Amino acid sequence: MNANLSTTEHTVTTEHTVTTTAPPRARTRLGYIDNLRILLAVLVLAHHAALTYGALPIWYWTEPSTSASGLALMAFVLVTGCFRMGFFFMIAGLFVAGSVDRKGGGAFVRDRLVRLGVPLIAFTALLRPLLTLHARPEDQPLGEYWFSIVDPGPLWFVEVLLVMSLAYVALRWLRTRSGGPTAAELRPTDLAGPVGAVTWRRIGALVGLLTVTTFLWRLAVPLGTFWEIGALPTPASMPQYVTLFTVGVLASRRGWLAGLTARQGRVGLVAALVTAGPLLVTILPFLSGEPVGLPLQMAQSLLENVFAVGMVIGLLVLFRDKVQGRHAWVRSAGRSSYAVYVIHPVVLVGVAMLLAPVVAPAGVRWLLLLALAVPLCWLLAGLLRKVPGVSRVL
């Protein structure tokens, strides 16, 4: 999930703003963050639609294909999965500090429990069982089946974001208790305001940190690991999630978004494009389940994080400089993107079941599924948010 969706608007803050201190700044809404969030939400749908028809059938409804287009869909899933969720966490981190500044720790925690906890529980209890209802054994009572499933599915992202947000509040409280700076002394910065230098050395240090921590972590939690506790499908990428969330928090304090240069954005995108092919080659051996040597594991960690950092920087700069549009439909789509993330699994599975009789190559069916499911998701999300009280959560 995305990635992120309107989670960053409605689970992190209802405005794309970061407050400042003496003198206070006017709150600034960043249009390109809305646009990025919409892009990442569409990528989530594209990812799960590719799992429906590709050669990696790990979704609730699958019609796998090992044709050329089926293999291409698998490659799409493997490569884009190396940055998408990390980018979601970074965008979420951008707005956490300012939200705590404005609301205070207690109010922030209560707000997170509502905006993250309620959708998490609702999805797990109401929507998740629907996704595999077609596979329920005929002799299993519906009630027994329904309550036998405790799995947040794609909302694992919301689950982890809730933990990270609460951990941030706790660490901030401990820092203040130990004599650290108060909220007023931290001087949060308007994301569209003062420029903080982003040097090549800092970018290199970030890639190095991610590479080393990912490599060491995966010695114990290899690619493909699934954690039953929390139902986490990608715990092997946890170092990236935590690090990029932290980078988002720091970026909001230090003006790093404004400090990124156009050249850094171009280099980031080029680096991502250049490493995408070799990255895929290093991932494929992990799919076999056979032991993979340490040199290949290190190479995979390096390529993955060069690709991820390059994509994050490249897209941030591209959207900041070129995709700032604030049309009414963009604002509306941005507000609904969190609801889209919550409901999209049910929509994708439902549309895919209706398309089951269609005979066409995997790539064509993928495009057809997206063409129907993307607008339907936003339409249903917009209608859902009109229900009294729902927009308070979604």
Image (cartoon, rainbow, N blue to C red):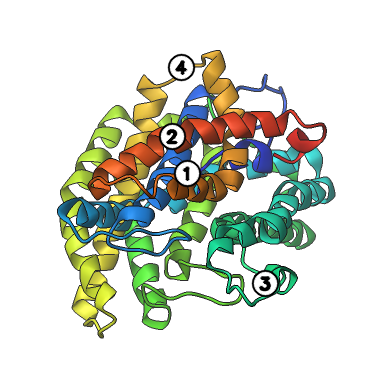
Percent position of residue 84, x then y: 41, 49
Residue 217, picture quadrant: bottom left
User: Which quarter of the figure is the C terminus placed in?
Assistant: top right
For disc 4, the marked residue is 325
Q: Earlier in the sequence, mark 4 or mark 1?
A: 4
- Circle 1 packing at 10 Å, graded few (<14), some (14-19), many (20+), is some
Give yes or no for contact between labels 1 and 2 (Cβ–Cβ under 8 Å).
yes
Q: Amino acid at mark 4?
A: Gly
- Confirm or deny contact between disc 4 and disc 1 (CB under 8 A): no
Name which of mark 1 and mark 2 comes first in the sequence. 1
Q: Earlier in the sequence, mark 3 or mark 4?
A: 3
- SS class, disc 1: helix
Q: Nearer the viewer, residue 28 or 173?
A: 28
Name which residue lies at 58% across and 74% down.
Answer: 137
Q: What residue type is disc 3 on? A: Tyr
Q: Which residue is mark 3?
A: 145
The residue mark sitting in front, 4 or 2, is 2
Gap between marks 4 and 1 measured at Cα:
31 Å
Sequence-wise, the earlier of marks 4 and 2 is 4
Position in image of residue 146 (x %, y %): 69, 67
